[in-house]
Image (tube, rainbow, N blue to C red):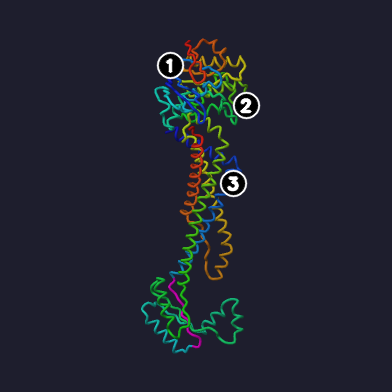
């Protein structure tokens, strides 16, 4: 048991030492792994950000009902009464065209535009808050209101949130595919770098085998090298994603603020970040294992 | 104890190198295996640690049938055999001491005990004090003695050397052979292949002469 632990400790130390000394080989492949993994990991972080954004909107059970321009006060009142009577409607707020115009005047940068108008182009509108939050219920209500003759347009935010959600589902699938493809690539990269490393230690492996080293003993340092390379690549991927998101947020945050939102892309959750690093480590281990097994098969006397 | 019975060896696409070799080496014996190059000396020695596999026949080493051993069991067979290779197979990217530590690194010894054994092995072959040198800095005789030290550092019961005196001058060759005699005197079974008949005759030990894949002559001590 003690000697077994000693073997593992030695193999790990050797792997770290190798990664540190041959800066060119090991570090470059860790970099390749890092850059490649940062693509799906970054894509995932972006999608998570968008999902959190749409989740907020989808839960906001609000829609705007615009009346046809030139609708009479009576028509507006009739619609208002109908809305209040509807059991699915929780709250109704009437926004008259005058109110809407003065609200618009208050917006910075728009007051000049408003002043230049010779008449009020805005319609009367109701802001309706539904009771249920389900997008289906909202869609049904919006569809009904659209058929009311005095209504020109119903804008339900949940609808585009739904569309965005299905788009993000598509994006998630794309990220998954990308991750799967790159996983193959990373196994191949590790396979190759470990093979080069094996070839530089060909003599040592040959002699070790001849004088009684087991295959497990020969395999061990290379497995650790693959693992360490993968873990370093995974950590590097996190760094790239973090830096990329920080850069993106420096642009996104001011933009979101103009919409009155504090939205910014969040970094991967600790669990997700750990998963990325461990996944990379596992790929490195796998690539190394395939590589060294293949080499040991090659040198096996027939 | 090592015993061959009706051992044949044919390399892929070649002709038979060994054609029905039978022999027995008792524990604690010293045997010289001679013959011209191509007689099958190297092949015979490689069959013992399972570096080559026989085409037919059986080889028993310390009660184990080597030809029937699973590949996973071969390393443990080899740890009980000290092997000195024809081309020595020293590692020139590390020191004398690190060359000796290689077989100790996978035998699972505590570091202190391993270091003690390494020094003991160096002492036996007269290389104490050269630990830090690179094998390339050693003379031919010293390199051969380092190869012997590496073979015996795990204290095997059997020592097998393939042409250990080739390329050495008479004095260095004699020194190497005397090391083998010394190990034999403390109970190690020793098999040495050499084509140098003159050298062998001086020691009055058992000589096995191979010719064209047969045991041509088995002259007891």
Question: Which numbered disc covers residue B136?
Answer: 2
Image coords of residue B72 (percent x, y): 43, 33
Residue under the image location 48 percent in, 34 percent down: A217
Q: Which residue is mark 3?
A: A28
SS assignment at label 2: helix
Separation (CA) of disc 3 from disc 2: 33 Å
Q: Residues within 10 Å of mark 3 (few under 14, many from 20)?
A: some
Whole-percent x and y of residue A138? 41, 74
Chain for numbered disc 3: A
Tell me where residue A252 appears, x and y as whole percent: 56, 65
Residue B181 visible in the snapshot: yes
Circles 3 and 2 on the same chain: no
The N terminus of chain A, quarter of image: top left
- Relative to A31, say whether A71 is above or below: below
Q: Which residue is mark 1?
A: B26
Give the image quarter of residue A245.
bottom right
Q: Are marks 3 and 1 on the same chain?
A: no
Residue with the most extreme left position: A87
Q: Nearer the viewer, mark 1 or mark 2?
A: 1
Q: Nearer the viewer, residue B143 or A76?
A: B143
Q: Which residues are magenta?
A: A60-70
**Magenta-span inclusion, residue A64:** yes
Indicate whether A78 appears above or below A33.
Answer: below
**Chain of the residue where label 1 is placed in the rendered structure:** B
Q: Is residue B116 in view?
A: no
Do badges 1 and 2 share one subunit?
yes
């Amino acid at each position: 048991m003690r000697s077994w632990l000693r073997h593992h400790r030695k193999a790990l130390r050797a792997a770290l030492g190798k990664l540190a000394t041959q800066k060119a080989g090991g570090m470059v492949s860790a970099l390749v792994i890092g850059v490649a993994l940062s693509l799906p990991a970054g894509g995932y972080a972006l999608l998570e950000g968008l999902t959190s954004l749409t989740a907020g909107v989808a839960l906001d059970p609000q829609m705007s009902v615009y009346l046809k321009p030139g609708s009479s006060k009576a028509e507006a009142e009739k619609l208002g009464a109908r809305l209040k009577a509807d059991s699915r409607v929780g709250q109704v707020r009437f926004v008259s065209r005058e109110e809407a115009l003065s609200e618009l005047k208050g917006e910075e940068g728009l007051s000049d535009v408003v002043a230049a108008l010779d008449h009020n182009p805005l319609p009367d509108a109701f802001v309706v808050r539904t009771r249920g939050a389900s997008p289906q219920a909202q869609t049904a209500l919006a569809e009904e209101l659209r058929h009311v003759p005095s209504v020109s347009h119903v804008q339900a935010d949940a609808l585009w949130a739904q569309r965005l959600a299905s788009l993000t589902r598509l994006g998630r699938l794309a990220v998954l595919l990308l991750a799967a493809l790159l996983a193959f690539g990373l196994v191949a990269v590790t396979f190759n770098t470990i093979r080069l490393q094996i070839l530089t230690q060909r003599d040592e492996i040959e002699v070790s085998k001849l004088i009684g080293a087991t295959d497990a003993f020969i395999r061990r340092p290379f497995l650790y090298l693959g693992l360490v390379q993968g873990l370093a690549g995974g950590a590097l991927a996190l760094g790239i994603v973090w830096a990329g998101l920080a850069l993106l947020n420096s642009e996104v945050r001011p933009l979101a603020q103009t919409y009155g939102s504090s939205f910014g892309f969040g970094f991967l959750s600790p669990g997700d970040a750990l998963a990325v690093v461990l996944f990379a480590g596992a790929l490195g281990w796998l690539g190394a294992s395939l590589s060294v097994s293949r080499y040991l098969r090659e040198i096996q006397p027939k | 104890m090592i015993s061959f019975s009706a051992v044949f060896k044919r390399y892929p696409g070649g002709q038979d190198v060994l054609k029905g070799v039978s022999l027995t080496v008792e524990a604690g014996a010293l045997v010289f295996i001679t013959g011209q190059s191509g007689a099958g000396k190297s092949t015979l020695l490689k069959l013992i640690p399972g570096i080559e596999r026989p085409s037919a026949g059986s080889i028993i080493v310390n009660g184990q049938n080597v030809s029937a051993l699973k590949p996973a069991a071969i390393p443990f067979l080899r740890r009980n055999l000290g092997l000195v290779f024809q081309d020595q197979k020293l590692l020139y990217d590390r020191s004398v001491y690190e060359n000796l530590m290689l077989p100790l690194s996978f035998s699972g010894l505590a570091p202190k005990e391993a270091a003690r054994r390494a020094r003991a092995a160096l002492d036996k072959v007269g290389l104490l004090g050269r630990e830090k040198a690179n094998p390339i800095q050693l003379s031919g005789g010293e390199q051969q003695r380092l190869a012997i030290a590496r073979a015996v550092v795990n204290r095997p019961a059997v020592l097998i050397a393939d042409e250990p005196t080739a390329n050495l001058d008479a004095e260095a060759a004699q020194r190497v052979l005397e090391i083998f005699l010394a190990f034999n005197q403390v109970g190690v079974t020793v098999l040495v292949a050499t084509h140098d008949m003159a050298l062998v005759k001086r020691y009055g030990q058992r000589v096995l002469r191979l010719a064209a894949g047969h045991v041509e002559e088995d002259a007891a001590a």
